[in-house]
Image (spheres, helix red, strand yellow):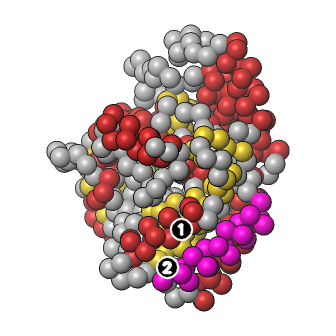
Amino acid sequence: MGPTERALATKRDFLVPCVYHFYQRPPVLVRGAGAFLFDADGKRYLDCFAGVTVMNAGHSNPAIIEPVVEQLRALVHATSVYLTEPVLELAWAIAELAPPGLRRSFFCASGSEANEGAIMLAALATGRKEYVSLDGALHGRTKAAINANGLEMWRTDPFPLADFHRVPGPRHPDSLPGLERLLRRETVAAVLAEPVQGNGGIVVPPDGYWSELRRLCTKYGTLLIADEIQTAWNRTGRWFATTHWNVVPDIVTVAKALGNGFPIAAYLTTDTIAAKYTRPGAATFGGNLVSCRAALATLRFHQEHRLGERSARLGEHLRARLRAVQHRRGVIADVRGLGLMVAAELDAGPNSAALTDAVLEQMKDAGYLLGKCGPGRNVLAFLPPLVVEPNDLDRMIDDLDRTLASVA
Ligand SMILES: Cc1ncc(COP(=O)(O)O)c(C=O)c1O
């Protein structure tokens, strides 16, 4: 039995079956370096998924690992009822990068938890109990967050919460009018939205969409929560994606790439909204010293290596190369994205999802791990570490071109 067969057998016996994996024959990953991953057989893969846009600063980055190891030796955990310095340094550093006014952070451990906290904070701040989210959204797997999801495959709760409403996604003509009809009732605490929908298929909203979201929320006394869990930390070419449209949300949630692989998440908000939350609030792992040290080193690395500019430049290059492939291979219906958050939607009619899986499998065998997303699971997602070299992306596109020719 090889490492894959052994791992699959153990997984079948001991994990909850909802934990699914990509690929018929998934590799067992054991090591990472920069933009590359290595499996138990020593095979090397160019990572084009970054663990769902987590490893933006690259795998096993010594500039992040070294300070983390130092912190591990000194103190791993204390919890938030004690004073420690890394969490305060991090809150200060984030306040300097965040959209204007979002100076206050509440730290926790995962994206779902950050959204759950933001949802509760909006109720405290507005005295309202309803929420609106968008079709195609993914906000998490905890009770409230899962009810905000707008993708059927991620709406598992058998008893959906009545206070969560949904309107069509950002590219649908009834998205904003539908939203306004709900907000007019003045019972909605918050609208939750991803600046670029990630799991929903890397959907970039039309120009003016976010400014209109902002205007409507302000008009009806509703808070605007930007779920930047995928988009923040330079994935779209900026620290925060909402700055592409000069929009300042009331609450921003972040996670994923903040810790570059160490679990850390937060919601960020204004002094005024934060002032509504004065009863005790604590997260055992919120402000964990190791994760905060990792996040501080991550932000420094992003700054020193100008990863925002790199993301914008490489994203444009990747989309141009994908469009050239699109001209040759009719099976690519659309190429889109912002920064190095890039999608190629495949269209083979009813076989689109199966074709996408076949492309993923062949690309894996050729040494590339791509992502997939979209309501029909027919969108190839390209979310490599932002440190990826352009010639490695070029090689990947050459192989994708050959793969599309052979599977189509
Ligand atoms: C936009 C967005 N929000 C929230 C989440 C949930 O984050 P987590 O898995 O850390 O709970 C995800 C996860 O992929 C996400 O993409």
Q: Is residue 164 magenta?
A: no
Badge 2, how many Cα within 10 Å: few under 14, some, many 20+? few
The count of marks equals 2
Residue 95, visible in the rendered structure: no
| Residue located beneath label 1 in the image | 362
Classify residue 395 as left or right of residue 134.
right
Q: Amino acid at mark 1?
A: Gln
Bounds of the magenta segment: 389-408
Whether residue 288 is situated above or below residue 295 in the rendered picture: above
Q: Residue at x 47, y 36 (%)?
A: 110
Front-most of residues 185 and 324? 324
Q: Main secondary structure of the magenta part?
A: helix
Whether residue 372 is situated above or below residue 90 in the rendered picture: below
Q: Residue 91 sits in which quadrant?
A: top right
**Secondary-structure class at tag 2:** helix
Q: Residue at x 65, y 73 (%)?
A: 399
Q: Which mark is residue 407?
A: 2
- Residue 382 location (% of width, % of height): 59, 63
Q: Is residue 398 magenta?
A: yes
Q: Residue at x 65, y 13 (%)?
A: 75
Task: State the separation of the CA atoms marked 1 and 2.
Answer: 9 Å
- Residue 226 location (% of width, % of height): 49, 50
Classify residue 223 as left or right of residue 360.
left
- Mark 2 and mark 1 in contact (Cβ < 8 Å)? yes
- Residue 31 location (% of width, % of height): 65, 41
